[in-house]
Amino acid sequence: MNKKIIPLACWLIPLQSFAAIELTDNLSLSGFGSTSWATSDNSTPLLVNRYIDDSNCFDCDTTFGLQLDFYYESFKASAQVVKRPQDDWSSPELEWAYLGYEWGDFEFRGGRLRLPLFLASEYYYVGHAYTPARPPTEIYNSVLGITAFNGLSVIWNTEINDELGLTLTPFYGFKDENSVKFTNNFRLEFETRQVWGLNAVLSGDNYRINATYLDSTYDVRALGQIYRPVGPFNTLVPVPIDDLVTDEHVQLYALGGEYEWGQATFSMEAQKNEERGSWYVGAEYNLGKLTPYSYFGQQYVDDEKSSNSFMLGARYDLLYNVSINAEWQTFKTHTGSGAFTLGPGDELEDSTANMYTIMVNFVF
């Protein structure tokens, strides 16, 4: 079976095969975390929610999560709290908290749920569950780090034949709020009015195909300040920003897959909405505890190439539940900001950047 599908299955049950702490016969506690040293050769920060620049950063990727699961016959309840890279330790995020009920091949869930968009969405913050230090930014930053919603979903698992399984997940979300910081002087606040969609996963012995459609209506407020020249000497003065745009609408289509061929694993994902699109391809080769890998991705704005990146790295499994990554990634922006985090009026002095990472991941 594909080595990516194994950690996915472990996470969905969730993480019990990684020696979760059994508090009672029906209650278990599991957890995960990541920390890194990361730096870039460009002073403009890279990667929204991580902000890696040309300083030595030991906290840009720091993640820690705890998950509590309760099972009783067909009933289940689950809650996950995560200190994400963008969070302070004093203000972690409730990533999910839901009640579920299994009935035959169906599972009904209600509460705060994970958005089922991409191949690694269900276990996005569990760094030990995927091979690179971070999932490719072209896809996983395309929704600005928004990973959860408040609403309902139905999961239908069925076997097409002895070697092929299908999972369909329609979902519907209600009002929700999210904030995304780009710079110290600029952020966006989103108020989702509704979101709905359908996720489909087709799984075989050595491959997995993921397809998603999402439709969302939301309001967005831009907050911060920009500096504008004023007077005869063009003196730069701060000008506040508070712009609200209502009834924005987005339709997102995503398609991805991974295929295991011997010791090699190949993956590809793409997503598209009305204005932007992106994709990546990746290859990994497992040598026991060591797995070298390489990824290439591109972003497009209005069908014009905006940026691209190339990643080369290696993962080493120190223990069954502890891994370390050493990684180099290069970015090139042609138009727009690409992987750089910029505010209104900000300009890039250098449109290329090299980023270096050493990361440790663990689960329990």
Image (spheres, helix red, strand yellow):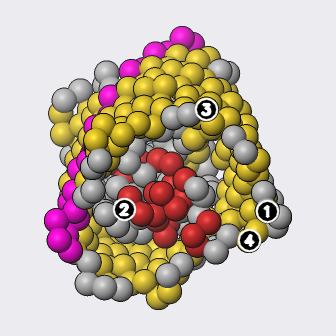
Disc 2 designates what residue?
A: 4
The relative height of residue 133 versus residue 105 in the rendered view (above or below) is below
The residue shown at (43%, 26%) is 198
Q: What residue type is labelled 4?
A: Ile
Using the rendered view, name the quadrant where residue 133 is placed. Answer: bottom left
Q: Distance between the residues labelled 1 and 4?
A: 11 Å
Disc 1 designates what residue?
A: 25
Label located before the other in sequence (1 or 3)? 1
Kindly report the secondary structure that dominates the magenta region of the rendered protein. strand
Q: How far apart are marks 2 and 4 (CA)?
A: 23 Å
Q: Which amino acid does label 1 sit on?
A: Asp
Count residues near mark 4 (Cα–Cα under 10 Å), then give few for <14, some for 14-19, many for 20+: some
Residue in front for this viewpoint, 21 or 80: 21
Give percent across and percent down for residue 352. 26, 60
Label located before the other in sequence (2 or 3)? 2
Q: Secondary structure under badge 2?
A: loop
Disc 3 designates what residue?
A: 103
